[in-house]
Image (cartoon, rainbow, N blue to C red):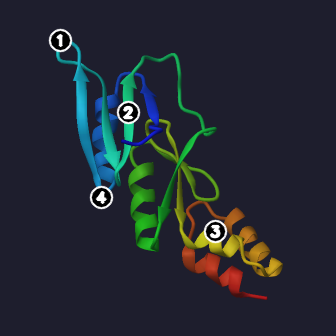
Amino acid sequence: MQKITPFLWFNDNAEEAMNFYVATFKNAKILHFMRLPDGKVFGGAFEIDRQEFKVLNGGPKYKFTPAISLFVNCETQEEVDELWSKLIADGGAESMCGWLTDKYGLSWQIIPSCLGKYLGDPNPVKAKNAMQAMLQMRKIIIKDLQAAHDKE
């Protein structure tokens, strides 16, 4: 059992959101739904890569903000591209530097694992070049990031 579990508050579409996230990520599954006596879902749980998430249909009082985001570490450009396109589909929105907001208002960072290596390079010129390239991107493009990092 994990010690800390993200708890996501939805207006009235938690079941739809859970199904969307499980369809978006490869290693994902619904763990359970909690239903009211009339059968309507009021909460539940799902997991992505063994990370559990709880959900609640709590009503319209609270909304997601970019102050909290879910960071997804991607190994390949193909993974970045696939998750990016799925998460912005049907009303999501691109932001800058690998951030996006999905159609439910939840913020995500879709980040290739090499970004940290490039930004943390001990050569300050290479690190700065990578940072400048990232700051110009919406979706992170690994080959462009690497080209910027490698130039001196």
Q: Is residue 4 left or right of residue 96?
A: left
Q: Are marks 4 and 3 in contact (CB under 8 Å)?
A: no
99 relative to 73, above or below: above
**What amino acid is found at the position of numbered circle 1 in the picture?**
Asp
Mark closer to the chain start, 1 or 4: 4
Q: In which quadrant of the rendered image does the C terminus lie?
A: bottom right
Mark toward the start of the polypeptide (4 vs 3): 4
From the image, tell me which residue sits under label 4. 26
Question: Left or right of 96: which side holds 45?
Answer: left
Instruction: Identify the residue position indicated by label 3 in the image.
Output: 116
Mark 1 → mark 3, Cα distance in angstroms:
48 Å
Image quarter where the N terminus lies is top left
Q: Residue at x 70, y 81 (%)?
A: 149
- The image position of residue 122, as x and y in percent, is 77, 79
Q: Amino acid at mark 4?
A: Lys
Q: Nearer the viewer, residue 91 or 68?
A: 68
Q: Earlier in the sequence, mark 1 or mark 2?
A: 1
The span from disc 1 to disc 2 (Cα, nearest Å) is 21 Å
Q: Earlier in the sequence, mark 1 or mark 3?
A: 1
Mark 1 — residue? 38
Q: Secondary structure at mark 1?
A: loop
